[in-house]
Amino acid sequence: MPQTPHIFSDVTLNTNFLAAIVLAAAVCNSWPQASSAPQSKFGINVKAGPMDTLLLKDYAPASSLVVPQTLVAKARYPAIDVHSHSSMNGIHSPADVEAWVRRMDQVGVQVSVVFTGATGAGFDRQADLFLKPHADRFQVYCSMDVANIEAPDYPERAVRELERCYQRGARGVGEITDKGWGVQASEGRALPRDKRLRLDDRRLDLFWKKCAELNLPVNVHIADHPSCWQPLGPNQERTPDFQGFNLAGKDVPSYEELLATRDRVLARHPKTRFIFCHLSNQGHDTAALGRALEKFPNLYLDISARDYELGRQPRAARQFLVRYRDRVMFGTDMGMEQRMYEGWWRLLETADEYLPGRIWWPYYGLELPDDVLKSLYRENALKLLNWTKP
Ligand SMILES: [Zn+2]
């Protein structure tokens, strides 16, 4: 790739321009709505037309911008993807596993960490499916037993199953999720609010302790993108594709309360390594996220599914990834299509501008320095994950 040291000054212009648009949008939002009378906005007389009846979900502007478009077919360094799901990728048979390995070879992924979402026989079946043919290309993570969490034997039972999964090949736990409905719970099967299991629940102390003993990292999804707590409407930040995740007005704790459960479990279990995925859902505020990293040495991050956070703030994101180069790992969580992997390489490795993404806003390439890229893609995972042969 040609060296383009000037690229971030170009981005400055663009982000200033974007800031102007954002400001304009903020101003427009405060104006009276829904009048068909001509309006003047910044000197333009806005006329009625076909775009007034367009649905938001169908809005997909084509760009006229002429700038370099770099195809990065393969990761610059053999990547370790620390966040993928067998269910999302539709992996059920040995042939499915082979197809995934071929894709990994094609795009430059050396190892994928697979969240099986299972314990018990379901976990064993998946462990065999991945590890028998390709123990060197996959790591499998088990889930957490959350049946009958109110029974007095629950803490010991969950630990016994964890040890069993470890014996069967699990090299980590995850993805453990609390979006407000409780750990590993969802809206449809949530307990009353005060009965829900939280990350910092005493009933999980033994489990987290055992993870440290077995040297098993834990991948955790806490809270969700902050826009989930904002109502769906004219000021909703994310594209309609994400509206199914919205939590506004629902019977869940606030975003801040959920992040506080993260901080408490990190403080109470300093020997357990926690990888909070999706930049711990704090990628919109890298300063706050940096403070959390400085406070908790056992906190690690993956960047999975937060392409749109990194790509909209190329300078802040680059600074963050450079500064915390030992704490952040590459992950996808977005299926296994070729163009998905290529999109990540382009975002992280190039200085391309105005990259098409999967949300309202386009992205800007981070052009990460070589050594940072290497840490992000593989070296941190080589250090932090458990590579004991199953
Ligand atoms: Zn995930």
Image (cartoon, helix red, strand yellow):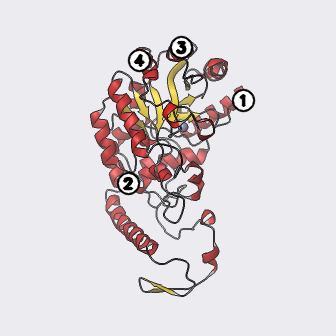
Nearest to N terminus: mark 1 or mark 2: 1
Is the CB of mark 3 within 8 Å of ligand 1?
no
Residue type at mark 3 is Asp
Nearest to N terminus: mark 4 or mark 3: 3
C-alpha span from label 1 to label 4: 37 Å
Q: From the image, tell me which residue sits under label 1.
A: 95
Q: Residue at x 52, y 61 (%)?
A: 360
Q: Position of residue 164 (x, y in %)?
A: 56, 12
C-alpha span from label 3 to label 2: 49 Å
Q: Nearer the viewer, mark 3 or mark 2?
A: 3
Which quarter of the rendering shows the C terminus?
top right
Nearest to N terminus: mark 3 or mark 1: 1
Q: Nearer the viewer, mark 4 or mark 2?
A: 4
Q: From the image, tell me which residue sits under label 3.
A: 153
Nearest to N terminus: mark 3 or mark 2: 3
In front here: 318 or 263? 263
Q: From the image, tell me which residue sits under label 2.
A: 314
In front here: 3 or 131? 131
Q: Residue at x 34, y 25 (%)?
A: 268
Q: Nearer the viewer, mark 1 or mark 2?
A: 2
Q: Would you say 189 lies left or right of 81 here?
A: right
Q: Which mark is residue 119?
A: none
Q: From the image, tell me which residue sits under label 4.
A: 209
| Quadrant housing residue 139 | top right
Nearest to N terminus: mark 1 or mark 4: 1
Q: Position of residue 315 (x, y in %)?
A: 33, 54
Structural crowding at the residue carrying mark 1, measured as other residues with C-alpha within 10 Å and reported as few (<14), some (14–19) or many (≥20): few
Q: Secondary structure at mark 1?
A: helix
Residue 169 against residue 310 in the figure, above or below: above
